[in-house]
Image (tube, coloured by chain):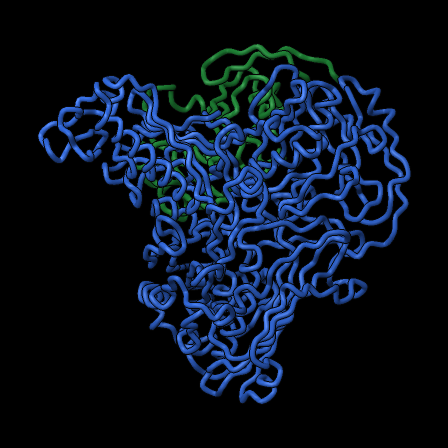
Chain colours: A green, B blue
Amino acid sequence: MSNQTTINLEINGQAHTLAVEPRVTLLDALRDHLELTGTKKGCDQGQCGACTVHVDGERVLSCLTLAVQVEGRAVTTIEGLSDPGAELHPVQSAFLEHDAFQCGYCTPGQIMSAVSCIREGHAGSDDEIREYMSGNLCRCGAYPHIVEAVREAAKVMS
Amino acid sequence: MTIVDTKMKHGDASDGLLGGRLARIDGPAKITGAADYAMEHSPEGMVYAVIIDSTIASGRVVAIDTSAAEAYPGVLLVLTPDNALTIKTATDWTGAPPPEVPYEPFAREITFAGQHIAAVIAETFEQATAAAALIKVTYEETVPISSFDDPRSGEGFPIDMMTKEWGDADAALAIAPVRIEQEYKTPREYNVPIEPHGLIAHWEGDMLTLWEPSQWIDGMSRTYAEWFSIPFENVRMLSPYIGGGFGSKALPTRYGAVAAIAAKMLDRPVKLAITRPQTFTAFGGRPATRQTIALGATREGKLLSIVHRSANETSMSDVAIEPLGSVTSIMYAVPNFSSRQNIVPVNTVKPGALRAPGENPSAFGIECAIDELAYEVGIDPLDIRLLNYAEEDPHAKKPWSTRRLREAYAAGAEAFGWAKRSPSVRSMREGKQLIGYGVAAGTYPVRRTPGEAMVRILSNGTIEVASSGIDMGQGTYTILAQTAAEAIGVPVETVVVKLGDSSLPRAPVAGGSQLANLMTGAVHVAALAARDELIGLAINDQNSPFRDLQANTLTIEGGQMSSPRDAGSSVAIAEVMRRTGRERIEALRNTLPENLRNKDDHFRNFTTISTMLSPTEGDYSMHSWCVHFVEVRVDVDFGTVRVSRMVSALDSGRLYNPKLAESQWKGGIIMGIGQALLEEGLVDQRNGHVMNNNLGDYLVPTNADIPNLEVISVGIPDTNASILGGKAVGELAIVGVAPAIANAVYHATGIRVRDLPITLEKLI
């Protein structure tokens, strides 16, 4: 079980060729093989949302996705949400302004989910934001500030 | 080493001063994915370790068959008690000298399910995980005592140092006109930081580098040094960001020893990340607790006596105490009092510290009991608290340094609209929802350990602050930048803060809600010393632009130096440094008292808790205080409980950054909502397993569980409590939340739930 396979991934608009075992998850491929550690491992079993990334524009849990499954699809991680040195994405700015995090570990996943939540049209009310952001756990308890940040970012993005 | 700068400041200039609402300066790194948490490093040649845990809770390991795992591709080493390098037992966190016996990270005699018994190290994480599943363990199993609900666990044994008594509590209770007595219980609860635990251990000769999330770099480094008999200075621990701890990342662990042993034996860096399920047994959370509280009172509700008997679970071989009388003994004025506590050994991992250990379950007991007394004598739950208000510490018999609890009651009641509460139970309703209002108070002590900090003024005018203290989300980076900026007189953008590295000046544990106060104090002292030296240089150096003024002193504001004798002209700090040819000005200062400044005491101060002062050391009793007002809605058919509204008023003294303090308060309140309604470690009584050892079954609050929260600061600066006037923040706000919710549920339904969490089957 250590047969490696070569896969081609497109992460944040850049092409990467990787030699990994087929059982390597997208999360571990990002963190251990591509040094993209902004995507976090919180549970490795699809329960916390810390590993949320976008695949073809949809939010997915990268711990429940094998790297080989995303060949030929566009993956966006927190590192690709805004260009280094360029302006922050409106969701990132709103998280900073509203102090929507403390330890910061769930934050990349929260932000990736928040971008999708707004794009999906699920930021229409505070209750709707709460519901559609509930797949991302935050143990520091930043939820009220996350709701404020998503509400504000949704205004900017509309 | 991580440098956090303040380039991305938001808000106005006053935000940079102490007390301003500056956005956290480590924020930009965290929202872009650039923040490098300890375990996100990849030293050359790194390999992966996976731990194998016992599947029985009691018995012994007879044999471990490692052959299949050893033959698996990529496997480098299978570690068991038979081949692991022998290490020494280290000094514990209290400073108690260690016994002269080896430290055994793997167990042969099993006392709880999930105890480490072996490890596999392989080239890749996937190989190590797959090979670990091939280890075959043969056990000789005995019947475990799974919890203190098992009658065989007995009453445990008394902890005399927990006894607090004055007056004659039993006699006063016996003749009290009103008597109530009930038992209150809390289950095992878990810290569950979203960043799981683990480390990367890397040996270079006899130098050990550890990337490990840590609430206490110096304490943990000392342990690693003693385990491997190397000098303290040979251990370099790095923990620039911590993905949450809540008490669970302060002490060294057995898996930490395993990783360091494996790295030494293989001479390769080893990464060991425990799995989410293992975070329920590799270290302990809050133990299960039970308390019996008997209150004796007048018919008007004035307390005459409190008799409190309590117990918490501990492991079979360790003493773990959750101080259950801590709030009981100080919240109310009572002339007769008795509190005693037992601990009950069961087959569990040794319990650990979880946000407000002691105060949290203690407040659940007394704050529910006083509510029950209010209904018993027929007065308002807020009024009974004011009637029994403690004007001084009833246990220590000392005045409070500050106690703004009366102000908190007033401000919270006003903002919440407590006056609209209908007194009788089950009297407020909207459709199928029963509505209840509840109130409860909380408190957390001010703990004090001396601190240390380095402040440098660099030639380009940058101010550098350095400490091995850590930031796990409390805001240490930010408030230390604000402290230095204010003390020296520079814009906060010019301050750079370095934390989380054992090569920096020492810091005690980030626990007991003490770090902000002791670190702002140390940085303040060091920054003033650096400022004084800068001014001395500017006055005296022959090349200084101020030399000719013959000034006695200079002022610094906005990074510009000027003289009162020549107010018109000012010179930037960088220009003064350039003209005088100084590379840097450096001030390393600590706040140790004179009698603790020798080398040994200095080391002891930062690597043990033996110098931490109690909240009643000195002339005053020092605590933070809070009150929570809660509205719940209970579905009349299904018994589901939702917190629909909450107002909390809190006294943490002076706030160094209200924006960040409010976040911490709200975080504590949310954890309290989880404790009240969701969180419960479910123990299989047959085999001692924690059945819900994952985030899908151990329920923590989600976004949809939490309403808008209003927090109100009623604190005033308390310079008895700390150098700059702050009191405890981080652990305060969780205290009192669960009883406030339980009291609101009673008001809504008429059903008194005395065992947490308050789940629907207890209400229908």
Q: Is residue A72 left or right of residue B456?
A: right
At which x and y percent is residue B400? 41, 65
What residue sits 76% from the left and 51% below the top? B317
Residue B322, picture quadrant: bottom right
Q: Position of residue B557 (x, y in %)?
A: 21, 34
Q: Is residue B460 above or below residue B213?
A: above
The part of the image, by quadrant, that contains residue B644 is bottom left
Which of the two residues, B508 or A158, is positioned nearer the viewer here? B508
**Observer-nearest residue: B195 or B570?**
B570
Residue B293 seen in render: no
Residue positioned 44% across, 59% down in the render: B623
From the viewer's perspective, is B714 left or right of B233?
left
The answer to whether residue B439 is left or right of residue B365 is: left
Q: Quadrant of the image for the C terminus of chain B?
A: bottom right
Query: Residue B50, percent across and down?
Result: 72, 30
Residue B392 image position (x, y, % from top left): 43, 70
Tell me which residue sits at (19%, 33%) in the image.
B554
